[in-house]
Amino acid sequence: MSSRPSAKPAAPAPSSKVKTLTIDDRLVSAREDESILDAARDNGIQIPTLCNLDGLTPVGACRLCMVEVKGSSRLFASCVTMVGEGMEVVTDSERLQKYRKTIVELLFSERNHVCAVCVSNGHCELQNLAQTLGVTHLTVPYRNPKLPVDASHERFVNDHNRCVLCQRCVRVCGEVEGAHTWDINGRGIGARVITDLNQPWGSSETCTGCGKCVQVCPTGALTEKGKSVREMSKRTRFLPYLTMMREDRSE
Amino acid sequence: MSKVKLATVWLDGCSGCHMSFLDMDERILEIAARVEVVYSPLVDLKEFPADVDVTIVEGGVSSEEDLHKIRMVRSRTKLLIALGDCAVTSNVPGMRNTFKVDDVMKRAYFENADLKQQVPCEVIPRLLPRTRPVHEIVPVDVFLPGCPPPADVIFGALVSLLDGTTPDLSATRFGR
């Protein structure tokens, strides 16, 4: 799917140049190695995201952060598009809203997200996105695929019914824990997250059981065992601290 | 001014959405002053009447009876509201959709039955191959997701619709 995650996101060089651009008609400046998404957020402009997580290398998997850039009819994933001098970016338009809603609808239709009986109900980023984007129903049919639940791990569960293929688990395991237990197998609609060489999680030899993948998972796909409906809230704030501490040590 | 004719129907759901509707407490009097409830699981009437202004549907479309009912309801209703996740997404009743109907019946009436193991063939309507959201069968005008949608949202939506304005649905979502 994507390139193998690098060991650590590159630290910004102190001498990096500054670019000036407009985002939603606002003149802003950003370092040349900053993404449009980061530049927007630095200026209080919110762009919806799902696969993006502070502390992990952006991959542009979910496409929710797409923006319009003047002079091009294409849309750009703002998490992986760097700022440019004189760029004119639009982060919200009727067209973008339509695409974002459709993306969320397709995510819901692709698997069996039955929010009402999910351990992550009320703490789910997909559920929140549907709410903020105004997705009150699906305009595409549900696929209702038959998908397995891997509960072979001693402490965690992998429920493919609720996976959105954001690859946060793949990235946190490879980039931060350094175990690279997770990967993506298959393509398109058949893509699945796998552990080691597509074997039960509980039999994985590389998994350290650290649980980082569980905490960064935006939905109820990776969860702790023994949680009931609504009980699984995730803690993602450890990630920027870990990254920061490591940067400090390398200096 | 004549009152708005309101109906509620209950397809494949747990009646929790009807409970949430009643959970608006004394505010229901405000609604009652403006509508006439012409049909509902709470009203003792067998036939769904003609010329209904607003119908609130709870539940997904699971059986041949549901299918017949929702088509008939749609043809006799001006404004159709899908209330709750079962009506909007098929939700829990739709969890059987990954299995074949025969397997579902086998599970319910043989594997999990101690006495008189048999598939009911009288009175109980036959299941459709899949439980489907209402809008996959007939056009729906307003969607109120939630399991159940909060009473405040139901009340607010009804008042907006009676006032002829667009309901604010930002306080509800899939799940709860």
Image: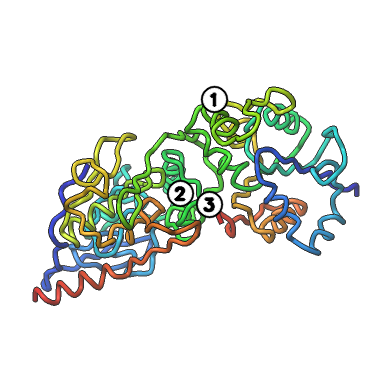
Between B102 and A51, the residue placed more toward the observer is B102
Q: Position of residue A187 (x, y in %)?
A: 27, 35
Q: Nearer the viewer, residue B30 or A143?
A: A143
- Tag 3 secondary structure: loop
Q: Is residue B49 depicted above or below B21 in this figure? A: above
> Which residue was labeled with disc 1?
B102
The chain holding disc 3 is A
Q: Are marks 3 and 2 in contact (CB under 8 Å)?
A: no
Residue at mark 1 to residue at mark 2: CA–CA distance: 42 Å
Give me the residue at 13% from left, 56% from top.
A6
Q: Nearer the viewer, mark 3 or mark 2?
A: 3
Which quarter of the rendered picture does the C terminus of chain A lie within? bottom left
Within 10 angstroms of label 3, few (less than 14), some, or many (20 or more) residues? some
Q: CA separation, marks 1 and 3?
A: 37 Å
Q: Which residue is mark 3?
A: A134
Residue type at mark 3? Gly
Residue A43 appears in the picture as rendered: yes
Q: Secondary structure at mark 1?
A: helix
Q: Residue at x 69, y 59 (%)?
A: B151
Q: Are both tags, 1 and 2, on one chain?
A: no
Q: Residue furthest right?
A: B1
Above or below B163: residue A251? below
The answer to whether residue A83 is visible is: no
Q: Chain of mark 1?
A: B
Q: Which mark is residue A97?
A: 2
